[in-house]
Amino acid sequence: MARLTKPVKEAAMKMLATKHDPSVMLTAYDQLRPTERIFVNAYVATDNPMRAIVAANPALEANPSIAAVRAHDMLKRPLVQAAIAQKIEKIAEKYDVSIDALVRELAFVAKANMYDYVRITPEGEPYVDLSEATPEMMAAIQSVTVEDVKEGRGDDAREIRRVKFQLHDKLRGIDMLMKKHGAYAPVGMNVNVTGGLTVQHEAVRETMSPEDAADYYQRSLEE
């Protein structure tokens, strides 16, 4: 039997002490096997399960069908799912792109109103006024175009400034928020991956009871 050198033995003892120390909370990522960690890192970086499984096991690149099955199996593992979620959450916190922050930005688009940006003269002529626009209101604007043009001829000619702006797609913003809040009827989704494998996913509804959600999760593990 091979003998452990002193530095390796000390490192191993420290790791074991940390693992069994009740004051230290191990993350899901800490508990993964080496190949699972490679898969999680690659999946978070690429959002591509096929590339992630090949990164974890390069030999699978020659057999896409088996790779697809292995990738699907890997994504069904609770610890892998938790580790992916934790890593994405850390990235979201670092760059302030959490789900709440993104939904808030989307809400600005969905609730944007032309009356927030346009004023009406006593003569009934509309004009753009961004002087009181808040950062939230500006977030809903897709583009602003400013043109200096001459109006009229001869001595009556005068330079005027035209300001045009375009809001982000309001209906698309509403549609995305509706989907986020589960306002639409759920639909099934087929995901085709390289090698011809088709994986059937049932939509999970936010209105599901805990019992229904548990049943769905159990079925997904048995597939």
Image (cartoon, rainbow, N blue to C red):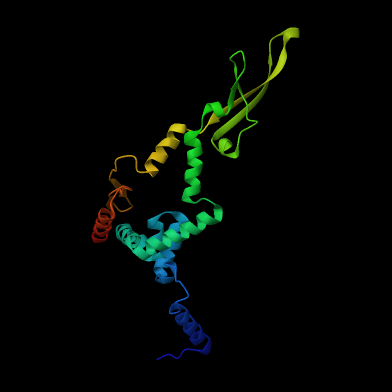
> Which is more toward the observer, 188 or 94?
94
**Image quarter for residue 185?**
top left
The residue at the point 46 percent across, 57 percent down is 88
41 over 152 or under it: above or below: below
x and y percentages locating residue 116 in the rendered image = 56, 29
Give the left or right position of residue 210, taking residue 94 as reference: left
x and y percentages locating residue 125 in the rendered image = 59, 16
The residue at the point 41 percent across, 71 percent down is 31
x and y percentages locating residue 162 in the rendered image = 64, 22
**Image quarter for residue 184?**
top left
> Which is more toward the observer, 156 or 109?
109
The residue at the point 47 percent across, 35 percent down is 110
14 over 30 or under it: above or below: below
**Image quarter for residue 165?**
top right
Residue at far right of view: 155
Please identify the quadrant where the N terminus is shown. Answer: bottom left
> Which is more toward the observer, 202 or 132?
132
175 over 150 or under it: above or below: below
x and y percentages locating residue 49 in the rendered image = 38, 56
92 over 110 or under it: above or below: below
Please identify the quadrant where the C terminus is shown. Answer: bottom left
Q: How many marks?
A: 0
